Image (cartoon, rainbow, N blue to C red):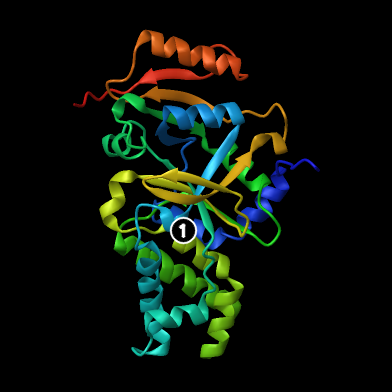
Amino acid sequence: MEKRKLLNSAEKKRYGTRFQIIDEILEEKKLKYNENSVFHFTSGQALKNMIETRSLWLSERQYMNDVLEVDYTKDIICEYLKQYEGENVVKEDINDYVDFHENQYIFSTCTESDLVNMWNYYTNGQGLSDSFCIEFDRQELKDIFLAFQEKGENFYFGQVIYRKEDQKSIIFETLDKLIQKSTNQNITTEHRKKLFDKYNYITEYFYSLCKQEGHSAEKEYRFVFCSNENSYFEYKRGLFVPTKKIFLNEIDENLKLPIKSIMFGPNHYSSIGSKSLEKFLIKNGYSENEVEITKSSLSIR
């Protein structure tokens, strides 16, 4: 099988231009996350599997914790369309404008570490004695995902937006600018539908990165694939979850996960535990002290 390749700087720049309008709006509103690290909360067994197999696992979005994500974003786009098409626009009409890709696979990270609600949620019910937080290099992680983007598939990444006011502002302004960019004339309903189809990847971006404000404590940063391929299932929370696995050896046999640090969860750290993790990392190709090992500052019962 032919090896995948990391994108060069010119290719990454070309990919980025697709999202230039929305990136500029996010920057202007100070809603774009530009830090170098993202954090992934997980169990000890999942951490072991990821490092040993040098793989990243993405879960199908319908099985994520916010079951209303898609309908929630549809309501906002519906509100946008009412400006042009009148109050008779209903949520079902969105399907005429947006070909929503149902097979979205998500790798969830956070913009902060040591978050108590995340320790509780992402430990597969095993308790705080089996929880870790992996600090990834965000840019290197993004580059790996881009190498696996198939022709015709879309890939999105970014900080999840939670405030309804921010979501409406970003969606309305982005769609307005796309329409203005395409024509200066008054456009018909049919023309508007064609524009939505042309910029379908932008509306998919909104579906990928908008959630209800009640989830804001998660401080989520997502990497999202739209793909029809699915060869795996993961059993968690009583469900058989469709899963997309990305194996780094398809790029380079020696490529490791871009891990900067690993944090033990609350009430979990011990000196022998730290030493065992260090030995495990060395066994799997990381040099001594390459990955910083830390412990949570929280104490929870």
Is 169 in front, or is 213?
213
Note whether residue 186 is visible.
no
Location of residue 95 in the rendering, given as x and y in whole percent from the top left corner: 48, 78
Which residue is rendered at x = 68% and y = 62% of the image? 152
- In which quadrant will I find the C terminus? top left
Picture quadrant where residue 228 is located: bottom right
Query: Which residue: 21% across, 26% down?
Result: 300
Q: Residue at x 46, y 12 (%)?
A: 276
The secondary structure type at the circle numbered 1 is helix
Task: Estimate the x, y position of residue 190 in percent, counting from the top left.
Answer: 56, 89
Q: Is residue 12 left or right of residue 60?
A: right
Q: Is residue 5 above or below residue 53?
A: below
Please tell me how crowded label 1 is: few (under 14), some (14-19), or many (20+) other residues with Cα within 10 Å: many
**On screen, residue 118 above or below 206:** above
Q: Is residue 47 left or right of residue 89?
A: right
Front residue of this view, candidates 297 and 29 = 297
User: Given the image, on which type of amino acid does mark 1 rest?
Assistant: Ser
Vertical side of 188 occupied by 52: above or below: above
Position of residue 250 measured from the top left corner of the image (x, y, whole percent): 71, 38
- Count the marks: 1
Q: Nearer the viewer, residue 224 or 174?
A: 224
> Which residue is the extreme one toward the right?
2
Residue pictured at 61% horizontal, 50% vertical: 231
Query: Taking the image as drawn, is residue 181 in sight?
Result: yes
Residue 161 x, y percent position in the rendering: 37, 55
Residue topped by disc 1:
208
Give the quadrant of the N terminus. Answer: top right
